Amino acid sequence: MEEVVRQLRLAIHEARVAFDCIGIGEIERAQTSLITARTAMDAADTVLRHSLAGHPAEEVAAEGIAVLAAIAD
């Protein structure tokens, strides 16, 4: 789950960078950031699907909650 969280945080960051780049007229840089954000989302999806394929959803959810709680500390 840590990898899913890491990839989602990267996607959020890159989406914010793209938003800011659009605001300052850096359209090519915005596009690059959007591609990176999409790639991070795809990676998070792949890791999550793999986790769900090998473990019950409840177990994956519990691990995700534990990871988020550890990050918050």
Image (cartoon, rainbow, N blue to C red):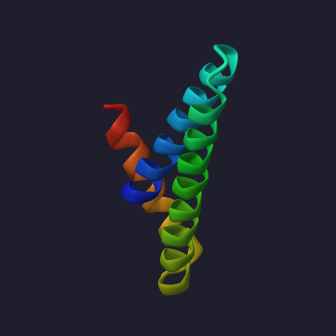
Q: Is residue 71 left or right of residue 8?
A: left
Residue farthest toward the bottom in the current orientation of the protein: 54
Q: Could you tell me residue 21's position as x and y percent?
A: 61, 23
The answer to whether 8 is drawn above or below residue 28 in the figure is below
Look at the image and tell me in which quarter the N terminus lies: bottom left
Residue nearer the viewer, 7 or 39:
39
The residue at the far top in this view is 24
**Left of 9 or right of it: where is 29?**
right
Q: Looking at the picture, tell me which residue is in the foreground, 16 or 32.
A: 32
Q: Quadrant of residue 12?
A: top right
Q: Is residue 38 above or below residue 28?
A: below
Q: Nearer the viewer, residue 18 or 65?
A: 18
Near-viewer residue (3 or 55): 3
Quadrant assignment for the C terminus: top left
38 is higher (above) or lower (below) than 20: below
Q: Position of residue 25 (x, y in %)?
A: 67, 18
* Residue name at image x 54 percent, y 44 percent: 11
Q: Report the residue at 48% width, 85% height from top.
A: 54
Q: What is the total number of numbered labels drawn onto the structure image?
A: 0
Q: Position of residue 50 (x, y in %)?
A: 50, 79
- Find residue 39 and report its horizontal and vertical position in percent: 55, 57
Task: Determine which quarter of the picture holds residue 46.
Answer: bottom right
* Residue at 66% across, 29% down: 27
Q: Determine whether 21 is above or below 64 in the image.
A: above
